[in-house]
Each structure stands twice: as C-alpha cells, then as structure tokens.
Amino acid sequence: MELKLTRPICFFDLETTGIDVGKDRIVEISVLKVFPNGNKESKTWLVNPTIPIPPQSTAIHGISNEKVANEPTFAELAPQVFAMIKDADLAGYNSDRFDIPLLAEEMLRAGVDFDMKNRVSIDVQTIFHKKEERTLSAALKFYCGQSLENAHSAEADTMATYEIMKAQLDRYEDLENDMKKLSEFTTRKKAVDFAGFVALNDKGQEMFTFGKYKNQLVDDVFEKDPGYYGWIQNADFPLYTKKVLTAIKLKKLNTKL
C-alpha cells in the first residue's frame, strides 16, 4: 500500500552520542522524503557532534570520533536539514519520544526556530507496540518478511521504518491511510513540549507535570511565583521546553494588554 499524502512526509532516524535529549548530540541523520505524487528524495549526513562519542555508543552504531572528525557540525548542516523537512510531516521509529525532541534541540541550538505547530508526527514504533509489541528488527521481519541488515545505521533504520509503515497500513484495516489520523493514533499523551514537562489537562489548559507545581496550571504558577519561569530558563531543561513556556508567558502578557 502506498501512502495517501496531501503534503510531503519525512521519515528520519538519528544516531547520537547518547540518549539524553538535553545534552547528547547527533552523529548521523538520514531523511527519506516522500511526496504526494510518489516521488522520493533521500539524504544522509554524518555529523561532528563537537563532543566525544562514548565507546558504548560507538559499539552500537559504529560511528567513532575519528570517523566524524572532519565532518560538518549540525550547526553547519541545520539549514540543509531544515530545508528538506520544513514543509513536511515527520515520521520515525520512537521518534515522538527521542528523535524529534533531540532534533528540535539541535535545531534550536543552531538558531533555527523549529516547531511542530503546522505539521503532524507519526511514531511507527507506537503503531507496532499497540498492535504487536516488538522491536524494529522484529517489526521488519513480522510485517515485511525481511531481515534488517546494518541495524543501527541511520539509513538502514530509516528505510526499514518506511517499509514497515506501508506494511502496517496493508495489515490493519482499521488504520486509516491518513497522516493526521495516524498521528493521532501514535500520540501517547497530550504533551505540549517534547520532553513532557508541560501537558494539557482535560480542559486543554497547560499544566506542569513535574516538581513542586505538578498538575498546577502554568499561568497560575507564573502568576503566584514569577521567579519560577526564570529558574526554568536558567536550569538544565530542554531548549524546546523553555521555548514553549516562553510562548505561554507571552500569550498571558498579550492577553493582559
């Protein structure tokens, strides 16, 4: 089954220095862009993360410090990556919880004002886990009858994710071939920021999900404890979380004007 698209969708995968969204960096990124007319465009970049790649990470994806020493930094690559994805929805494997949040952090560090306001995201892993509870390699075997060669290479994982999603649409009649509906199906919770520090309550209001103000409205907290916003901005929170909270604070200020 081919995808029914009204706009392009970019399947992508990251290989990184580690799994800390706020601190780790991209060492490889692969993007497969699928257009509504069926055309495809793909690009893979090796990235100098500007920080050491731990040996345990190299053992997984095979990318060493020496391999990327002369590659461009993400700050240098960001305009190219953004140009490829800016008009597209995003899809990946575990992308809602890791790849998109880390990509957003890298984009913001590079000065690119990245957000998800005018696009949807589809996490193929969530479809898989809701339906079968398996890993990426098992998913490819289960849905496509193929073995995943070169696992933990960004390009191989990206192509596997694309093939799995098409096979999922073939297999499950209740899955609609519609990117917005698939995005809704793969959304785990109503988080406002990628890291889940801010979420929507049943009334659609932003609330904190952590700390001493857990489950309290962001607007109320900023009203009674103005210094809390400054503490978050100066603390070790993801850049995207800080951006979201700044937008909420400005919205409140504009409402008062």
Image (tube, rainbow, N blue to C red):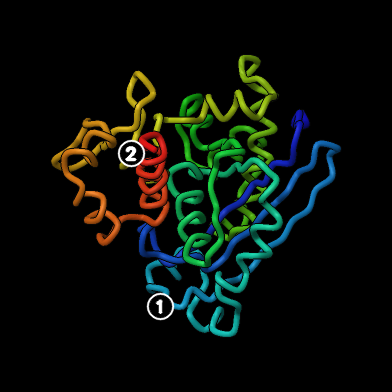
Give the side of residue 58 with respect to residue 37, left or right. Answer: left
Please give the label number shown on residue 52: 1
Position of residue 151 measured from the top left corner of the image (x, y, whole percent): 56, 56
- Give the amino acid type for the residue marked by disc 2 in the picture: Val
Disc 2 secondary structure class = strand
Position of residue 203 measured from the top left corner of the image (x, y, whole percent): 35, 19
Q: Which residue is mark 2?
A: 198
Q: Rounded to the nearest whole Å, what is the CA distance between mark 1 and mark 2?
A: 31 Å
Which residue is at the far front? 257
Give the side of residue 24 with respect to residue 217, left or right. Answer: right
In depth, the one of 239 and 183 nearer the eye is 239
Q: Is residue 209 above or below residue 169?
A: below
Position of residue 22 measured from the top left corner of the image (x, y, whole percent): 36, 59
Give the side of residue 203 with respect to residue 75, left or right. Answer: left
Q: Is residue 75 above or below residue 156?
A: below
Disc 2: CA contacts within 10 A as few (<14), some (14-19) or many (>=20): many
* Image quarter (top left, top right, bottom left or bottom right) of the N terminus: top right
The tag earlier along the polypeptide, 1 or 2, is 1
In depth, the one of 140 and 128 nearer the eye is 128
In depth, the one of 152 and 251 nearer the eye is 251
